């Protein structure tokens, strides 16, 4: 019996250890992705999943939004991330997930993406707000940064917490079947 419990805890350790070092964030906009409105709904777009925050992924996302007529107006204020194209050169760079609500050409637009984390000297939200100060077409209503996986979702349950709960559930089921056998 004790051996089976020990095996369950070892399995739990493997499940929780198999995680990426990179932060994972939703990277979408309400104009280009159906489920990316003020409330994120993956039911409308099942392939909308958190992506690793790497310079390459951020650059791909910027190229994607440049294709959209209205979103193309926003790409210039993400220029502060240009230096992150080769993220390997910045191993200690802290990343954050961001959720911004903008008013662009009389439309409310939600943007979820990766961003550099707030530091003592840099606040990405204030930097973007400063860049938008004299812009007549774009107004930022809200900008939030968070530091855990998929936290730029309106409703959030960490996948790692889910793995831990499933592991415990599996352990209890295993013990229950062991007693019945």
Image (tube, rainbow, N blue to C red):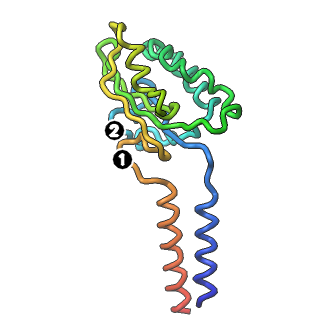
The front one of 19 and 28 is: 19
Which quadrant holds residue 128? top left
- Residue 70, disc: none
- Tell me whether circle 2 and circle 1 mark residues in contact (CB < 8 Å): yes
Residue drawn at 43 percent across, 40 percent down: 146
Q: Describe the element under mark 1 as helix, strand or loop.
A: loop
The front one of 1 and 42 is: 1
Residue drawn at 35 percent across, 7 percent down: 134
Q: Describe the element under mark 2 as helix, strand or loop.
A: loop
Q: Percent x, y for residue 30?
A: 39, 28
Instruction: Count the numbered circles shown.
Output: 2
- Residue 39, disc: 2
- Tag 1: Cα neighbours inside 10 Å, few (<14), some, or many (≥20)? few
Residue drawn at 53 percent across, 16 percent down: 67
The front one of 32 and 95 is: 95
Q: Percent x, y for residue 86?
A: 69, 28
């Amino acid at each position: 019996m004790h051996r089976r419990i020990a095996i369950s805890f070892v399995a739990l350790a493997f499940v929780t250890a198999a995680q990426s070092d990179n932060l994972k964030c939703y990277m979408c906009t309400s104009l280009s992705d159906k489920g990316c409105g003020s409330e994120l709904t993956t039911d409308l777009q099942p392939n909308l999943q958190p992506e690793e925050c790497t310079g390459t992924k951020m650059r791909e996302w910027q190229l994607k939004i440049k294709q959209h007529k209205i979103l193309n107006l926003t790409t210039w204020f993400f220029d502060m991330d240009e230096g992150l194209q080769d993220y390997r050169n910045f191993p200690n760079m802290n990343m954050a997930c961001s959720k911004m609500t903008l008013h662009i050409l009389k439309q409310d637009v939600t943007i979820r993406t990766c961003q550099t984390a707030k530091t003592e000297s840099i606040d990405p939200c204030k930097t973007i707000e400063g860049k938008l100060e004299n812009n007549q077409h774009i107004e930022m209503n809200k900008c939030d940064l968070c530091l855990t996986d998929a936290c730029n979702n309106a409703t959030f349950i960490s996948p790692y917490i889910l793995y831990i709960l499933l592991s415990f559930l599996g352990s209890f089921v295993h013990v229950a079947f062991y007693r019945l056998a």
